[in-house]
Amino acid sequence: MNPGARTTDLIKKHEDEILQDWLQRQLGAVTARHDLLKKNDLEEQSRIFLSGLTAALQRGEVGDIRGPAWGPVRELLASVSQSRARQGFSPSETATFVFSLKEPLFAHLQKELAGDAPALATELWTTTVLLDKLGLFTVESFLKSREEVIQSQQRTMLELSTPVVELWKGILALPLIGTLDSERTQLVMESLLTRIVETGASIAIIDITGVPTVDTLVAQHLLKTVAAARLMGADCLISGIRPQIAQTIVHLGVELGDVVTKATLAGAFGVALQRIVDSGARIAVIDITGVPTVDTLVAQHLLKTVAAARLMGADCIISGIRPQIAQTIVHLGLELNTVATKATLADAFALALQRVGLAVTRPTPRG
């Protein structure tokens, strides 16, 4: 007789007894979580698992739980692990669901095969190995599900920790709290660029009061964000430069270029307001909406055109800087820092009117 065959017959013969015994042991275990799982749900899960276990054993696939016969059982265990990971169960509490079946099964096997020691030993060993494999699969599924939960929570926390708020019409503020790494910088950049497009802001204040320290890497992340924002038509100010951070930046030889910095958010906001009311001179708008991509050669041509216009007494604004083009320019290290840029021609036109001292009021759509 094949290993596991007598266990299969035993479960079929005493299924209700084994189920009730198993259920009582789960409910009475020290790892039981009556606050998180109802008795009816536990009973339903146990019944489905025992039925799936019997069906897989009947097909004779005892050694390999990765086989097709065990597909329904694996799906159930994965589902149970995922739900319990989200509910707050521990790995041991989750694994007990499988391991607690050993005792009632062994008790019935001992009673059924009391006069056949070799057969009893074979069935006990086969059942032990099988339930151990299923228990380990449950733990693996649980850990995978919990890792997904943790990653989702981390992503949510990152999004909540990088809010972009509109302080004034045309002025955005991005208060940063905690450390800046590559992943978070990308999220910060995306959030800021999106809000610049949505609001048409011309100034963004990056407040680093909540950033514990600024080293070379953090400074590089900040400069990339500033460069991307400028390509979208918004100039950046950095506030929250405390004395110890200022000294650290100097000692490290970190270059913040022509970025205006202030000790407080209030100070940066004052500068931003002054720039908003500042008037300009003759303006030329170069729209590159129809240009599919911007590489080094295209950027050089644009800068030559801007330089020629300035020699004629006209300042230039480049419009049509889409998010993907802004990111491409930053990644290529292209320099358009001295040129005002905007996402759309309408935004560039509005900026041009502001620079020559004309106020622009955009109509608010009616809901």
Image (tube, grey):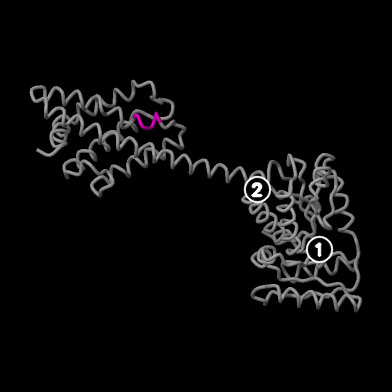
Magenta segment main secondary structure: helix
**Image quadrant where residue 53 sits:** top left
Q: Horizontal placement of 214 versus 359: left or right?
A: left
Which of 303 and 313 lies nearest the eye of the viewer? Answer: 303
Quarter of the figure that contains the C terminus: bottom right
Q: Position of residue 168 (x, y in %)?
A: 80, 52
Q: Residue at x 77, y 46 (%)?
A: 207
**Dot 1: what SS?**
loop
Q: Horizontal placement of 156 versus 221: left or right?
A: left
Q: Position of residue 199 (x, y in %)?
A: 73, 58
Q: Residue at x 43, y 29 (%)?
A: 36
Tag 2 residue: 181
Q: Residue at x 32, y 41 (%)?
A: 76
Q: Is residue 93 magenta?
A: yes
Q: Amino acid at mark 1?
A: Thr
Q: Which label sits on residue 118?
A: none
Which of 170 and 298 lies nearest the eye of the viewer? Answer: 298
Judge the density around disc 1: few (<14), some (14-19), many (≥20) Cα neighbours within 10 Å: few
Badge 2 or badge 1: first in the primary sequence: 2
- Range shown magenta: 92-96
Q: Amino acid at mark 2?
A: Asp
Rendered view: 333 above or below 125: below
How far is disc 2 from disc 1 in space, using C-alphas? 39 Å
Tag 1 residue: 361
